[in-house]
Amino acid sequence: METLILNSNSKKDVRLLVDIAKKLGMDLKVADEQKKKVSPKQVKTMKDFWGALSDETAKKLHQHVAQSRNEWELIFISRMQ
């Protein structure tokens, strides 16, 4: 079974897709709109995490991420050559 995700606020778009699927003999299920909505209170921003790590831990994490990125770049570049 394959999954197709269509992100549209237009009911017209969804109806068109359902009609096309029926004509092609495809089994199409439309997800419940209520289940996929995220309330603004659930969305976190960087501001919400400020102070969650100590300065020392944040610095170590940043260094680790930078090192990992450099390693990935070296692997990617070596495969391109």
Image: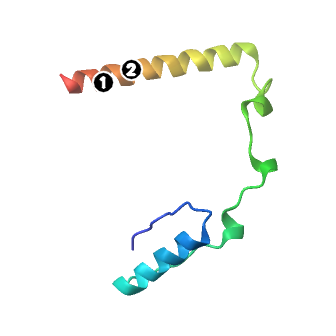
Q: Where residue 80 sits: x, y (%)?
A: 21, 26
Type of amino acid at the residue the image marks with label 1: Ile
Type of amino acid at the residue the image marks with label 2: Glu
Q: Residue at x 54, y 77 (%)?
A: 15
Tell me the residue that label 2 is attached to.
Answer: 71
* Residue count near mark 1 (Cα–Cα under 10 Å), binned few <14, some 14–19, many ≥20: few
Residue 41 in the image: above or below residue 71: below
Tell me the residue that label 1 is attached to.
Answer: 75
Is residue 17 toward the left or the right of residue 36 in the image?
left
Is residue 35 toward the left or the right of residue 1 in the image?
right
Cβ atoms under marks 1 and 2 closer than 8 Å: yes
Q: Does residue 51 appear in the picture of this structure?
A: yes
Q: Residue at x 56, y 15 (%)?
A: 63
Q: Where residue 53 sits: x, y (%)?
A: 75, 23
* Residue count near mark 2 (Cα–Cα under 10 Å), binned few <14, some 14–19, many ≥20: few
Q: Quadrant of the C terminus?
A: top left
Q: Nearer the viewer, residue 49 or 12?
A: 12
Q: Nearer the viewer, residue 62 or 9?
A: 9
Q: Residue at x 77, y 55 (%)?
A: 39
Q: Residue at x 72, y 30 (%)?
A: 46
